[in-house]
Image (cartoon, grey):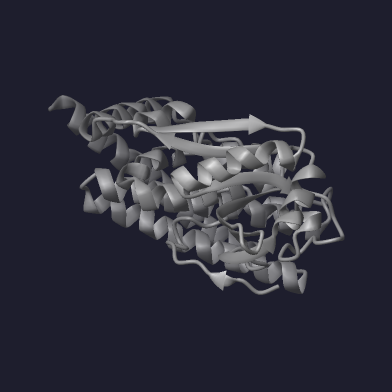
Amino acid sequence: MKGLAYPYDRGLYSRLFLNCYQRQSLVMLAEREPQVHQLFHRCLISTDDILQQIIREQRPKYSFESGFFDRDDLERIGIVREEVEFETYADARSLLLDVVSQEGYAILVGDVFYWPHCPEYTTKHLVHTILLKGYDPKTAEWSLLDDNPASLLCAYTYPEELIAAGFDNGELRRVRYFTTKPFDAQEAGVETRHAFSRLLERYQDSYTLLSDVGELISCPWIAPERAVAALHDAFSVYQGTRAGLGEYIRRTCVAPDVEAVVDRIVRQAEGVMNQLLLGKVTGSVDPGRLTDACRGLKADEQELLVRLKAVDEARESK
């Protein structure tokens, strides 16, 4: 099933780092609240955390834990995250209609097995979210947004019974939505900068992911295809976090030299991702070339940290 492409910032709100729920939510929130960029201060995530979760623990990307979408971060910019569990779609229907009418959207948690646009349709059961945008009582159809097979947000229209089937047979039968409340934008910016300062103060990174990438590729205890796939996921998360961090820096830091470093990191991380993607297709990766690219990334990461701390210290001294 082919959907109609939805307009949004595909570079920032991508599935490199964000899971389906976070990305769908952010696209909607960004249309309604200009301070959403404050949330991206949480993208200061160490490569050690990425190495531990994606490589060593073999977690799927969508289960990566980072503190992103923290309730306090959302409420700081006037956004309250809500979640309600139901036994059946029939029980949830009234709330869905009310929330979509009032807020313009609601997020439904269900099972990809029942939704034709999903690659796993009728073949695999997997928890997933779809974003409901409107209900037409004349046709008994829901309009919704979700990923197409290329992980781009697209608009689809489904009969209500398909939405109900995905919900009723899902492992998690929940409705998620957001409400808003008044807040002071200037105060929110100051509080977020303080939160970012605390992250910087605690930040530690051995850069083992970047230093030992050649050894990880050549490890005799891991099948090459598994090593490449895991590293591809790891560098996907890495690139996505740096893209998000770059957005926060651009909107709040006013330091072009810091922006230049993080932009360079994002470009270099994309190059590493492309090498690994090619390796997934061909079955081989050049460890030397990969090592050289990651050596440059490590130097830039160290430089970025120094520059961020210098900006933070200068700001705190004022």
Q: Is residue 48 above or below residue 110?
A: above
Q: Identify the residue shown where x is 25% and y is 52%.
A: 257
Q: Identify the residue shown where x is 58% and y is 62%.
A: 273
Q: Residue furthest right?
A: 123
Q: Residue furthest front?
A: 138
Figure quadrant of the N terminus = bottom right
Query: How many marks on residues?
Result: 0
Residue 245 seen: yes
Viewer-nearest residue: 209 or 202: 202
Q: Identify the residue shown where x is 42% and y is 47%.
A: 29
Displayed quadrant of residue 12: bottom left
In the rendered structure, the answer to whether residue 156 lies left or right of residue 27 reads right
Viewer-nearest residue: 267 or 43: 43
Displayed quadrant of residue 152: bottom right
Which x, y percent locates residue 167? 74, 45
Which x, y percent locates residue 37? 35, 45
Q: Identify the residue shown where x is 61% and y is 71%.
A: 3
Viewer-nearest residue: 101 or 17: 101
Which x, y percent locates residue 235? 59, 54
